[in-house]
Image: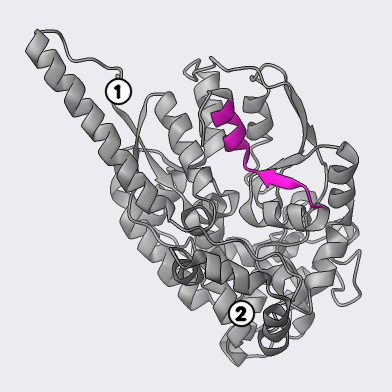
Amino acid sequence: MDHIELSLTQSLDHCIKCNICTAACPVAAVTDKFPGPKYVGPQAQRFRMEGQPTPDESVDYCSGCRVCNQVCPTGVKIAELNARARGQMVAEKGLPLRNRLISHSGLVGRLSCGPHAPLVNFGLTFKPARWAIDKLLGIHQNAPLPQASSYSFRAWFKRHQQTVDGGRQTVAQQGERSGAAPSTAHRPPSRRQVVYFHGCATNYYEPRVGKAAVAVLERNGFEVILAKQNCCGLPLISNGDFKGATSAHEANVRKLLPYALKGIPIVGTSTSCTLTLKEEAPEILGMHGDDVQAVAAGTYDIFEFLRDLAERDELDTNFRPIKRSLPYHPPCQYRAHRLGNPAMDVLALVPGLRLNDSHADCCGIAGTYGLKSEKYQIGMDVGAGLFDFVRDSGSDLALCDSETCRWQITHGTGVASKHPIEMLAEAYGVAL
């Protein structure tokens, strides 16, 4: 039994049955179908043996929000235990078609994105079609499915790189003809590099988030590398497909390891993706070894990375004023990074911009959780307080670092939502 396996198992013995996790659980607060983290986590885990059916299938109603982990006074890894239990259920009974479909977000995104995106988007807003999908697959007819993009972020980045490289070549040629030293106006002076992990949502649904991230990183003197990558595997983990998630994480480690070993930071805009690379995949899947740890150690959320630059006085703070007060929701997966609130810290440097923390436990969507017919209303009930906060702000815009949370916020409030990196790009005067 490896170190990670031991830490999960041994954490059971730290449970003091205090019920703090159950009192804080946003899901247990709105439905009787989930008795609470303590009961399906450390308590039920004592009866889960290899080759023995799980004693409590209500664990499938755990949304994986990690609030229980955050409030546990003794550090029991409750969310990880629940995820393992769900994985055991899938191993015993198989993965339903609905869960198989929504957990392969990369494949679904690839099939949806492109010139045919308007047709796909029409189908997903056509009420008879959504009713049929609900009845046949169990994806709720009102669940917030994202709008596919007519182009992928990677396609845009390829064109962007050609433009940047062409500009560099032109400047160099002009310098050679004039005898002047090569200009640094079109390239980072220090040639510092960073790998951008965009994730499925940015690539297929929200290329604007990736464009904003590239603009901000380049503004701060970094050459952005777009390494080969695949889905981080979190949707697979959340739906109990540990075999598929292991394959996904192993593939990402192979693709990202050469950069991590060179000390090139891996920076992501999806808080879920970066947490999966850093912690969730290694810990929940029981993956270990130097390669996995090297990638984990070299991965940063983009605002974690930018805040580090600011603390070293290396962040370009020549911002345009933005005189706005905006509601901001730090998603569950972001809080699980245990970094404080780097997005608020960095955006506080923009003159006139004020972010108001929602202090909400969860938006309720929890990745794919709130898409499911039997869990949709639970998700909406969990997010009700957040929705009230956003509506009461009177703002026409809300900020959130997680893509599925943004879609849920807009669905629950009718208020548009953006990634905070888009506001930072705006402060730099970048038009997306």
Q: Give above or below for 318 relative to 251.
A: above
Ranked by sequence position, the earlier of labels 2 and 1 is: 2
Q: Quadrant of residue 36?
A: bottom right
Which residue is pictured at 9% across the width and 15% down the height?
A: 176
Residue pictured at 75% horizontal, 53% vertical: 410
Q: How is the image coloured?
A: one colour
Foreground pick, 293 / 24: 24
Asked whether the viewer can see residue 381, the reply is yes
Instruction: Give coordinates of residue 63: x percent, y percent.
Output: 73, 66
- Is residue 238 among the parts visible in the rendering? no
Front residue of this view, candidates 89 and 77: 89
The residue tagged 2 is 99
Tag 1: amino acid: His
7 or 148, nearer to the observer: 148
Disc number at residue 369? none
Tell me which amino acid carries mark 2.
Asn
Tell me how far mark 2 sits from mark 1, CA to CA.
46 Å
Q: Which mark is residue 186?
A: 1
Q: Is residue 69 left or right of residue 243?
A: right
Q: Report the magenta residues as a range.
A: 414-426
Q: Is residue 283 one of those drawn in magenta?
A: no
Q: Quadrant of residue 260?
A: top left
Q: Secondary structure at mark 2?
A: helix
